[in-house]
Image (cartoon, rainbow, N blue to C red):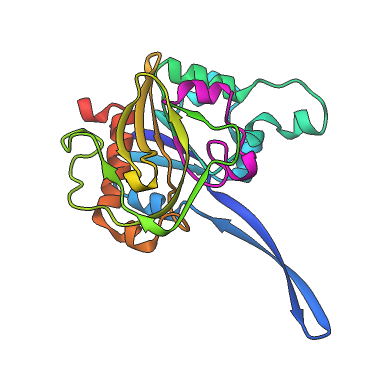
Amino acid sequence: MSKRVLLLGESWVSSATHYKGFDQFGSVTFHLGAEPLVKALENTEFELTYMPAHEVVEKLPFDLQGLKEYDAIILSDIGANSLLLPPAVWMHSKPMPNRLKLLRQWTAEGGGLMMIGGYFSFQGIDGKARWRNTPVEDALPVTCLPYDDRLEIPEGFSAKIVAAKDHPILQGIDGEWPLLLGANEVLLKDGAEVLATLPDEEGGHPLLVSGAYGEGRSLVWTSDIGPHWVPGEFIEWPGYNQLWKNCLSWLTRLESK
């Protein structure tokens, strides 16, 4: 039986102005950032629904029943405001359900919640992701910092594995992990299980952490899905696909079947 997974975020729009001598023109480009993960989950037990950031604002369910259509929900590179400020609230001052509280309740009642790092994950660039002191943070095994939490490591770092290699999330991933170029800094909560960290010389900050919340499970990967923190070599590494399948198997309890 397949497990239904909802991925929220991992899209953006960029605008540019092009100067050519005396003249100039503008262009707008839409970007998707989750293609490596989407590809990794093809032909697996996981039925992935990919909801880009601009769709999350209005399409993420406003009720618990809608969230319960999914076995796992992943928040990746999307700030809290996108869930807190749908047009009904932002433009029309209409009260609406708080989807951060719904995600917390959904997790407590057995859902599998994951946050993946990025510029708009955890507290994010300039502190603008704003997940600190939110109901979603309650359900995660880590606490967000109150300020810009990016760890930019341009020379790269290799993950330090601190859990047993037979842990369900680490099974089948052998050898040294390829370099990563950054992560979000977070603080561990009591009871969290640390599976991997940054190396000691980079502060030993948490990289992969699991936990429980009520009847549910939660997981964080503080680096990214893809560039720029995740180079092509990491994506092409066989362990990349295995890591995501293991994470989702653990979140949805497939590993115990």
71 relative to 229, above or below: above
Identify the residue shown where x is 84% and y is 84%.
22
Position of 55 with respect to 46 (left or right) is right
Q: Magenta region, mostly helix, strand or loop?
A: loop
Tell me which residue sits at (61%, 52%) in the image.
12
Q: Identify the residue shown where x is 47% and y is 39%.
A: 185
Foreground of the two, 176 or 214: 176
Quarter of the image with the N terminus in it: top left
Count of residue discs: 0
Residue located at (65% from left, 36% from top)? 82
* Residue extent of the magenta highlight: 115-141
Horizontal and vertical percent position of residue 165:
17, 38
Residue 197 horizontal/vertical position (percent): 33, 40
Q: Position of residue 257 (x, y in %)?
A: 20, 26
Please tell me which residue lies in front, 169 or 1.
169
Whether 111 is drawn above or below 122: the answer is: above
Examine the structure image and report whether residue 17 is included in the region drawn in magenta.
no
Task: Specify whether 151 is left or right of 170.
Answer: right
* Residue 193, image quadrant: top left
The answer, for residue 191, to whether it is visible in the render is: yes
